[in-house]
Image (cartoon, grey):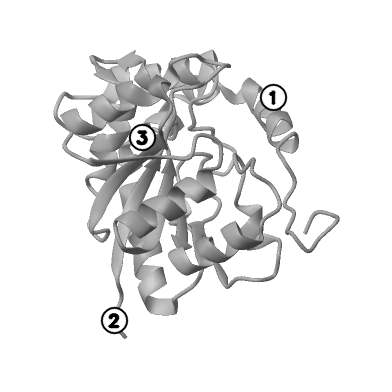
C-alpha cells in the first residue's frame, strides 16, 4: 500500500490572554516557539513542517518566525482550527497530518515518528500516544477523516477538538502507549500560565545548550532528580482543566446533544 505526504502542523496563534505573548517570550535567548520548532525538525518520518496560524494581523509576527526558521507557514481561518488544518492539508496535498500545539514546548519528535509509523501500519483516522506528560504527545489525523468532521460538525469553536474523533464512533482511533520511562500523565509540560513559563525557564536554564535540542529522556531524568521543578506548575492544572470544561461541546449537525 502506498501513502501520500505526511506533515507536522504546528498549530499556533499569538492571542493568549492568560499569558499574553506566551509563544513569543524569550527563554535562554530564543523565543519559546523557536525552541519547539527546533524539536519538531528532529522528527524523521513526516515529509515537512508547516506552521498553521491565522490571517489575523496579530499573527504577522509568527509568519516572520516561520520565515526566519525556514519552515512553511499557512494562514487560515481565525477561529476554526479544524477548517484551518483542512485548508492547509489541501494546499500542501497532505494525506496525514500530525498536529502539535504551539505551547507544547517539549513535544517529543520520537512520538511524532511513532504516530506516523502507526498510520502507515494501520491507516487509522486518529492516533495519539496516551499517558505521556500533558503537552508531549501530538495528534495524528487522516485528512479524509478531518474533512468528514468539518462537513458534519455543528460548532465553529474548535479550540478543543479531539472529541470529534474519539467520541462520535465514526472513526478508527489508536491510542499508543509510551515507553515505561515516560509514562508520566501527571506531569504538566504546556505553556498557559506564568507558572508554566517559570517551569520551562527552569528546565532550559539547567539543560539548554545553544544549537542543541534537549533530549526528552534527559528532561525526564532531570525532573526525577529535581521534583521541586516538576512541581512549579502543578497547581495550575486544575484551572486548566476547568477551562477545558467550558469549551464548546462536540455536536454534529444531525445531533441535538453532545455526541
Asked which secondary structure carries label 1, the reply is: helix
x and y percent of residue 111 in the render?
Answer: 38, 54
Give the numbered dot on residue 239: 1
Determine the residue positioned at 23% across, 53% down.
48
Cα distance, mark 1 to mark 2?
44 Å
Determine the residue positioned at 57% across, 66% down.
148
Residue 102, by quadrant, is top left
Cα distance, mark 3 to mark 1?
25 Å
Task: Answer with left or right where residue 32 lies relative to residue 137.
Answer: left
- Which numbered disc, 3 or 1, marks the residue that appears first in the sequence? 3
- Which numbered disc, 2 or 3, marks the residue that appears first in the sequence? 2
| Viewer can see residue 209 | yes
Task: Answer with left or right where residue 130 lies relative to residue 71.
Answer: right
Determine the residue positioned at 43% across, 27% down.
56
Asked which secondary structure carries label 3, the reply is: helix
Q: Nearer the viewer, residue 110 or 46?
A: 46
Query: Which residue is label 3 attached to?
Result: 219
Query: Which residue is label 2 attached to?
Result: 2
Q: Nearer the viewer, residue 138 or 164?
A: 164
Amino acid at each position: 500500500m502506498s501513502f501520500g505526504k505526511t506533515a507536522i502542523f504546528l498549530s499556533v496563534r499569538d492571542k493568549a490572554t492568560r499569558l499574553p505573548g506566551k509563544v513569543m517570550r524569550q527563554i535562554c535567548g530564543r523565543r519559546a516557539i523557536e525552541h519547539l520548532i527546533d524539536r519538531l525538525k528532529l522528527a524523521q518520518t513526516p515529509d515537512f513542517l508547516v506552521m498553521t496560524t491565522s490571517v489575523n494581523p496579530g499573527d504577522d509576527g509568527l509568519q516572520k518566525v516561520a520565515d526566519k526558521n525556514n519552515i512553511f507557514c499557512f494562514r487560515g481561518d481565525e477561529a476554526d482550527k479544524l477548517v484551518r488544518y483542512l485548508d492547509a492539508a489541501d494546499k500542501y496535498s497532505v494525506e496525514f497530518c500530525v498536529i502539535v500545539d504551539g505551547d507544547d514546548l517539549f513535544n517529543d519528535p520520537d512520538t511524532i515518528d511513532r504516530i506516523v509509523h502507526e498510520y502507515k501500519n494501520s491507516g487509522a483516522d486518529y492516533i495519539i500516544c496516551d499517558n505521556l506528560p500533558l503537552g508531549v504527545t501530538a495528534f495524528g489525523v487522516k485528512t479524509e477523516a478531518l474533512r468528514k468532521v468539518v462537513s458534519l460538525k455543528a460548532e465553529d469553536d474548535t479550540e478543543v477538538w479531539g472529541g470529534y474523533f474519539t467520541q462520535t464512533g465514526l472513526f478508527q482511533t489508536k491510542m499508543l502507549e509510551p515507553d515505561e520511562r515516560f509514562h508520566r500523565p501527571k506531569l504538566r509540560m504546556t505553556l498557559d500560565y506564568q507558572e508554566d513559563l517559570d517551569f520551562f525557564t527552569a528546565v532550559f536554564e539547567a539543560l539548554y545548550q545553544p544549537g542543541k535540542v534537549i533530549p526528552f529522556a534527559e528532561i525526564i531524568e532531570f525532573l526525577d532528580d529535581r521534583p521541586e521543578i516538576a512541581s512549579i506548575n502543578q497547581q495550575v492544572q486544575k484551572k486548566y482543566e476547568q477551562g477545558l470544561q467550558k469549551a464548546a461541546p462536540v455536536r454534529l449537525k444531525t445531533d441535538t446533544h453532545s455526541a
